[in-house]
Image: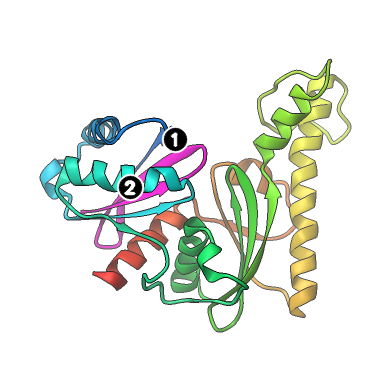
């Protein structure tokens, strides 16, 4: 089994691949203050919870947008499973080109999402990644990453709305019965859910105008189902796009 690890700002997502089959997905909270020993213990506990035998882990690969955890996680995996984890970054083979000012600055999670989309679904494409931040990525016909838009994430906006005002509360994220809310909570839900859906629709239109044609749109990220269900564009959601990209990159480099 190959262990794929996606270290995000909010959560660390773990996935196990037997060949190309994703056997399990688990999430733990991201905490840059934890030590190698703590992460080794936590990951071991999570994998045992999913019935994964330690002896089955033959390799590992990490994508991280939290640099302080890179060395910590590599050492934790070495301690727990005795394997040297690959780290997605400069010098690693991905199978795609990065056409931007500084390719080394492109987030590892974005690279993995692009790799998976290109190899599984084909190019050109737009990719909407809805995590702590909302990212919209564009891949051209040759499978080249051509750029992106990074937008404040849904939960970031929701927390700012509640913390920056005197009378607006913290709320759960779900769609209200109608766009015109009849109470404070539904008014906030309308703005957050329908507002973000409309923003994504508008950005997709702008990307299509820039390309001169409509591209297929794919999406991933924990908030994608809640928001994208209300978009007018046809968007295919793949919850495990980044993990699948990690598995593809691992095989290219091993």
| Relative depth, front residue between 39 and 238 | 39
Image colouring = rainbow
Check disc 2: other Cα within 10 Å, few if <14, some if 14-19, many if 20+.
Answer: few
Residue 239 drawn above or below residue 19: above
Q: Main secondary structure of the magenta part?
A: strand
Residue 158: x %, y % from top left: 72, 31
Residue that extends furthest to the top in the rendered view of this protein? 167
Q: Tell whether position 15 is magenta.
A: yes
Q: Quadrant of residue 60?
A: bottom left
Q: Is residue 6 magenta?
A: yes
Read off the residue under disc 2.
71
State the extent of the magenta-drawn residues as a range.
1-23
Residue that carries the numbered disc 1 in the rendered image: 30
Q: Is residue 250 left or right of residue 113?
A: left
| Closer-to-camera residue (143/160) | 160
Instruction: Please determine whether, in this image, residue 36 is positioned above or below residue 124.
Output: above
Q: Is residue 87 above or below residue 31?
A: below
Q: Earlier in the sequence, mark 2 or mark 1?
A: 1
Q: Residue at x 43, y 32 (%)?
A: 31
Image quadrant holding the C terminus, namely: bottom left
Q: Position of residue 248 (x, y in %)?
A: 35, 66
Can residue 175 be seen? yes
């Amino acid at each position: 089994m190959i262990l794929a690890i996606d270290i995000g700002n909010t959560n660390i997502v773990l996935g196990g691949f037997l060949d190309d089959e994703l056997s399990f997905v688990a999430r733990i909270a991201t905490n840059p203050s934890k030590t190698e020993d703590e992460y080794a213990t936590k990951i071991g506990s999570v994998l045992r919870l999913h019935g994964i035998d330690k002896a089955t882990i033959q390799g590992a690969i990490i994508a991280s947008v939290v640099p302080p955890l890179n060395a910590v996680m590599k050492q934790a995996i070495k301690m727990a499973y005795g394997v040297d984890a690959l780290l997605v970054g400069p010098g690693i083979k991905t199978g795609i080109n990065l056409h931007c000012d500084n390719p080394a600055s492109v987030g590892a999670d974005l690279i993995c999402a692009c790799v998976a989309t290109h190899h599984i679904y084909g190019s050109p494409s737009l990719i909407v990644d809805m995590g702590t931040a909302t990212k919209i990525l564009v891949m051209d016909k040759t499978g080249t990453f051509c750029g992106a838009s990074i937008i404040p994430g849904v939960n970031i906006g929701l927390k700012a709305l509640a913390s920056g005002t005197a009378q607006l509360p913290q709320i759960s994220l779900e769609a209200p019965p109608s766009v015109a809310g009849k109470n404070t909570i539904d008014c906030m839900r309308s703005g957050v859910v329908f507002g973000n859906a409309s923003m994504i629709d508008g950005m997709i239109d702008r990307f299509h105008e820039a390309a001169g044609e409509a591209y297929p749109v794919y999406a991933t990220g924990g908030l994608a189902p809640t928001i994208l269900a209300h978009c007018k564009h046809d968007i295919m959601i793949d919850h495990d796009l980044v993990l699948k990209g990690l598995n593809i990159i691992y095989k290219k480099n091993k």
